[in-house]
Amino acid sequence: MFSILRPYIFSLDPEAAHDLAIKSLKLNFVPKIFFEVKNEEMLETELFKKKIKNPIGLAAGFDKSAEVYNSLFKLGFGFVEVGTITPKRQFGNPKPRVFRLEKDKAMINRLGFNNDGIEIVSDRLSKSMPGGFLGINIGPNKDQKHKILDFLECFSKLNKFASYITINISSPNTEGLRDFHEEKLLNELLTKLHELKKNNKIKCPIVLKLSPDIEEKEINNINEMILKFKIDGIILTNTTNQNRDSLLDIKKHESGGLSGLPLHKLSLKFIKIFYKLNKGNLPIIGVGGIDNGKSAFEKITSGATAIQLYTGMVYKGPGIIKNIKQELIEILKKEKIKNIQQAIGINS
């Protein structure tokens, strides 16, 4: 169906197409069985000490305000991440702010954390509890000078709905956010989160989402902070506001974060580095440039416990999840691997 509708969808502005997708998912008319595959038990894995049906997740940025997460589970995702959620409702940056780079199978966005805010999102989540493994991605409002306060407020109010909370310090579209990769600021942020979690006896895992634009000399400091505060996992990586030289599309010079196929090798590099640094003991969610079973398997064998996609679904439609599951199962059989967990890090 998507292949038939694709020319019409791509004739729309990317945000209009996204809004149409959200409205369609709200109808909740697609039966779950349509996206199931044979031998899916081979893909069952563990993430933050919980079993999930498969390691394929939806990255944050699609369901920004937690409107359709339960419909998304029906598409076959093993887990879904919503957000980025900020304390106050936020429109984001001026439009146009999303661009398809069709020649590169990529996208650039400078959305700026547009979302409905904590109160509306909390109300939605309380009225329709997640029917699967749900991550909630949090960040600060644009006008907040003391960004740590926003992280603390979001974590405090949203952790009870989440299977894990992602601390987003890596979007290139909020001024000053990536400064939290620096040792002093990261230490301050993680100290406050650790204290909040301990004092309130919060069990919800904390995950840190990192930028692909950090320099290699920063990696050891960041990793030391992760170990010091017993962060439960990392997401590698967010979008890049660099790496444009090899792109073909004329829109490559738009400001914002680049996602999609050009990010695949870049995120792989960081997955391998952090996997080796932590000897496979730190759960890694790999994201960037996944649009088939081969690229998903490459992320996992490089050290990712699980993977996420978003741009791939924009170009290939919701059937991409079923296709990746089928292709992963075929690869596992060919490689004589009984379960996907056994493939984690074998080529790191």
Image (cartoon, grey):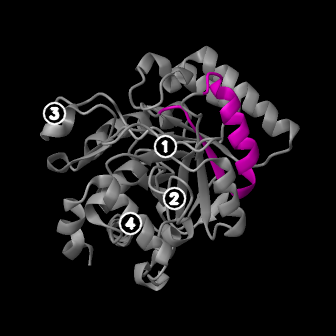
Quadrant of the rendered image containing residue 312: bottom left
Q: Is residue 155 magenta?
A: yes
Front residue (pair 8, 221): 8
Identified by mark 4, the residue type is Ala
Front residue (pair 255, 119): 119
Which mark lies nearer to you, 1 or 2?
A: 1
- 147 left or right of 271? right
Range of the magenta residues? Answer: 144-170
Q: Is residue 18 visible?
A: yes
| Residue at 65% across, 50% down | 164
How far apart marks 4 and 3 lie (CA) works out to 31 Å
How far apart marks 3 and 2 lie (CA) works out to 34 Å
Front residue (pair 158, 97): 97
- Residues packed near mark 4 inside 10 Å, few (<14), some (14 to 19) or many (20 plus): some
Label 3, on which residue?
246
Label 1, on which residue?
91
Q: Earlier in the sequence, mark 4 or mark 1?
A: 4
Element at badge 2?
helix
- Residues packed near mark 3 inside 10 Å, few (<14), some (14 to 19) or many (20 plus): few
Identified by mark 1, the residue type is Phe
| Residue at 21% across, 73% down | 3
